[in-house]
Amino acid sequence: MALTPERILEALRTVRDPDLGKDLVTLGMVKRHDVDGARVMITVEL
């Protein structure tokens, strides 16, 4: 399966903030996500 921005967000929705109990995408912590071939770049604001 090819990596797409949508698949990256889907995977990040499984990562939960331990204090708030919500995922990083819902909390708006994912500021940028790019796919360049097999390379993925993610910017997360803590």
Image (tube, grey):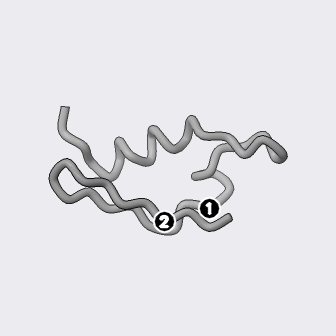
Q: Distance between the residues labelled 1 and 2?
A: 8 Å
Asked if disc 1 and disc 2 are in contact, CB closer than 8 Å, the reply is: no
- Residue at the extreme top of the image, as rendered: 1
In the rendering, at what x and y percent does residue 25 appear? Answer: 58, 52
- 1 vs 2, front mark: 2
Q: Residues within 10 Å of mark 2 (few under 14, many from 20)?
A: few
Instruction: Using residue 40 as the reference point, say whether residue 24 is left or right of it.
Output: right
Classify the position of the C terminus by image quarter.
Answer: bottom right
Mark 2 residue element: strand
Q: Residue 34's quadrant in the figure?
A: bottom left
Q: Which mark is residue 29?
A: 1
In the rendering, at what x and y percent does residue 41 appear? Answer: 36, 60
Tag 1: amino acid: Met
Instruction: Using residue 17 as the reference point, say whether residue 33 is left or right of it.
Output: left
Residue ID at (15%, 53%): 37
Residue ID at (43%, 60%): 42
Tag 2: amino acid: Thr
In the rendering, at what x and y percent does residue 35 appear? Answer: 26, 57
Q: Name the residue under label 2.
A: 43
- Residue at the extreme right of the image, as rendered: 19
Q: Residue 20 carries which label?
A: none
In the rendering, at what x and y percent does residue 38 appear? Answer: 19, 48
Residue ID at (60%, 40%): 15
Instruction: Using residue 10 as the reference point, say whether residue 2 is left or right of it.
Output: left
Residue ID at (48%, 65%): 43
